[in-house]
Amino acid sequence: MLIIDCHAHIYSPDEKRYPVREKPLRPPAGAGSAEHLRKESQAAGVSAVRAIQTVTFYGYDNSYLCDAAKENRAWMAGVCTLQPDDPESPKLLRKFAREYGVKSLRSIPSAAHPQAGFDDAGVRALWKVVADEGMSVDIFLMRSEMVESASKLMRDFPKLTIGFCHCMDLKPGPKLEEETRIVCRLSRFRNLYPKVDFIGTGTKESYPCRDLHHACLEIIAAYGAERCVWASSYPNALWTPKISYAEHVRLFSEALPLKDRDRRLILGENARRLWFPDLRV
């Protein structure tokens, strides 16, 4: 079965070449590099990975992400993150796409204009570059109060492929049912593709993390299996401490009650169609 990881954070062990931000959130020793990710993912049967700029480690300096994406383009697609309030960001995004082969932008809301959120001139300028360069967007929509502004933006870019990071980071608790409904209502945007990795990031249980199965199955039903994609949130000791990389795969290959067709679509076939059309396995 083809498996593609749609969300993995990467970290270089060379902090002289790639300086880190103040008070970085560090992965465990030995984990996080592109080389370690390749070893870990291949051991779990994963053929390709979308690598995410790690803002909690590098801020908005995408140097390592760009270099790793260029050096490993046979199996890696880079997803950069840029500050929409910086007027230099659109120019940088074009450079990343043309010189390093970065495929996607992880889009965050405006910090300088919090009332605007995603519906902001700086965010829109970046999305315009994405459209012009034939890239895609991963929207970092994590709070319900940002849904309205994100919806306005997505309505104006109906042809962009948009990955939905973490499905608003759903977690067990009193807000789970309401927030699951919000995520499901966003399925009206036909170009929005949810990453169903929130089971690993949000669970309070060990494998098979049954406390979030129902929410995940509701989202798959709302969007259709042909629009959902699997992701690991690597490195797992940091971001999914209750389950390992391999267990994250097994959630969708074994634990969840899915049809074989749906497993194939979610674990890899959808991602190949959207982001890896030339992948040969």
Image: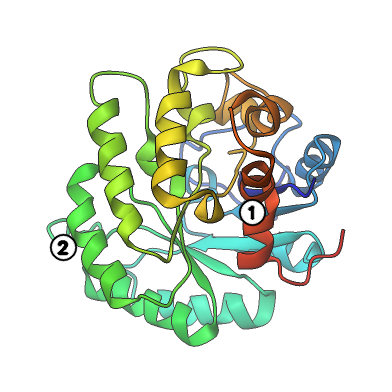
User: What label sits on residue 15 in the rendered view?
Assistant: none
Q: Helix, strand or loop at disc 2?
A: loop
Q: Residue at x 30, y 18 (%)?
A: 173
In which image quadrant can residue 231 be found?
top right
Q: Is residue 156 above or below residue 6?
A: below
Q: Is residue 71 left or right of residue 89?
A: right
Label 1 Cα crowd, 10 Å radius (few <14 / some 14-19 / many 20+) = many
Q: Is residue 110 left or right of residue 22?
A: left
Q: Is residue 3 left or right of residue 50?
A: right
Q: Is residue 266 above or below residue 244?
A: below
Instruction: Find the distance from the CA under tag 1 to the CA under tag 2.
Output: 28 Å
**Percent position (x, y) of residue 256?**
59, 27
Q: Name the kind of residue labelled 2 in the image.
A: Ala
**Percent position (x, y) of residue 266?**
61, 47
Query: Which quarter shows the N terminus?
Result: top right
Q: Is residue 38 left or right of residue 28?
A: right
Q: Residue at x 28, y 77 (%)?
A: 156
In which image quadrant can residue 69 be found?
bottom right
Read off the residue under disc 2: 116
Q: Is residue 249 above or below residue 204?
A: below
| Between discs 1 and 2, the one toward the N terminus | 1
Q: Name the kind of residue labelled 1 in the image.
A: Ala
Read off the residue under disc 1: 51
Q: How many labels sit on residues?
A: 2
